Amino acid sequence: MAQPTENKAKDYVPGGPIPLPGQTGVPYVTPLKDLCVRVVAANFEARPTFGKLPALYVKRVIDLLNLDLPLELVGTLIDDEQYWKRRSCARWKNCQVAAHGNSWKQLYFERNVENALERYDPATTEINGLKRLLAYSKRFVRSINISQLPSHLDLQLLFDATASCLTTLSLTYGMMNVGMDYDRSLFGIKLSDCRALAKALERTETLTYLNLSGNLLDDEKVRMVASGMVDNLSVTHLDLSHNKVADRGVRALAKLLDSRSVIAFLDLCDNQIHTEGGRALARALRGNHSLLHLNLRLNRIGDEGGRALCDVLRSNTSLQRLNLCSNELASLTALSVAALLGTNSTLLELDVTSNNFGAEGGKQIREALEDNRTLRAMDLRLCNVGAENETAIAELIKAHCANVDYSSLGSAGTIYPSKGK
């Protein structure tokens, strides 16, 4: 008996005929809808429109789109987060979407602008191309974090393009991965950069966070930056840490902390501030009602400067966090800290580690804390206050944290446990 001819179907190939349901390997004609989806995706750059496609098929088209389509095209038409996630992860290894408003689209545009600014070279890159990039990216850019800017580009260009949207700017003037080609002139902000930044700060109305840490800012340069912030009412967070700011520069910054100030966070960690700088800040805080966080860690304000600050803060009703770590403070400041803790009702965190308060100063602080009910964290390690005082203070802070009513703290922010042991 003759055997019937066996009709062996070819294995299914993606993009080819689709097998009938329940008949594995047996092809049938691809539905017209599927063909249309593929054609729309393949020709999207030439015909950038979804027409009247239902939402289901729009999603399928987006899933098939190339990841190298022009940004000017897809930026306007595509909001699908999965597309931008695929595009971002294909270009960069580490993508922290939480740092970009939890939006993959925002992440892609912000990092793309950052890369363009960092790699800009006037000798090889047309300025018009950069202007065009900023123009069509501004709708999706809120935060810019530049880790190198060798071109020392005039920042007015950036501020003009993002005048109504940029809220966060972090700038580091330097060069990454220089290796044996290290050149001191490649690092640090120049006075001309500060002048351009000052002009831009005079006009911005949306920028709230400005970070210029690690830029070799000295007194002359910080005075120039401060001149642009005299009438600025938008910047609330100013980070000038790890620079070379001394007393003259601090006096210029102190003028910004008047009764009209909106600065809530001021970071001057690791600078060259001495006693006069501490006194200038103390005078400014006398009439200031906006500052919530002041970081003066790793300076040299000395015992007199520390005492001046703490004396003023006894009547201050806004400051919640103060860091005076490693500032050559001694017994005079210890007594002022004790008086501060006895009267101030807004300070939540105080760090005075690596100073020299002595056992008597530690005793005064411990006694003041017995009547204080607001301080939630205090660190005075390496202050020579003695193990007994350290232990007693740590227990008092722990008791404060155990009894705190967190719902009544309002905008006080995160409460950290005591570091004291």
Image: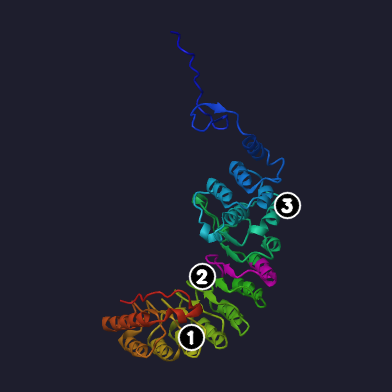
Horizontal and vertical percent for residue 82?
56, 50
Instruction: Check disc 1: other Cα within 10 Å, few if <14, some if 14-19, many if 20+.
Output: many
Instruction: Check disc 2: other Cα within 10 Å, few if <14, some if 14-19, many if 20+.
Output: many
Q: Where residue 241 is drawn, which disc sits there?
A: 2
Q: Quadrant of the C terminus?
A: bottom left
Q: Quadrant of the N terminus?
A: top left
The single residue placed furthest to the top in the displayed view is 1
Looking at the image, residue 34 lies above or below residue 318: above
Looking at the image, residue 256 lies above or below residue 183: below
Q: Which residue is mark 3?
A: 128
Pointer 3 or 1: first along the chain = 3
Pointer 2 or 3: first along the chain = 3
Instruction: Using residue 148 as the reference point, say whether residue 153 is left or right of it.
Output: right
**Is residue 209 covered in magenta?**
yes
Q: Secondary structure at mark 1?
A: helix
Q: Where residue 36 is drawn, which disc sits there?
A: none
Instruction: Give the magenta-colored segment's residue range.
Output: 194-217
Horizontal and vertical percent for residue 405?
41, 81
Q: Secondary structure at mark 3?
A: helix
Q: Which residue is mark 1?
A: 309
Pointer 1 or 2: first along the chain = 2
Q: CA distance from mark 2 to mark 3?
A: 34 Å
Which residue is at the front of the view, 406 or 266?
Answer: 406
Horizontal and vertical percent for residue 118?
60, 54
Instruction: Using residue 346 as the reference point, say whether residue 34 is left or right of it.
Output: right
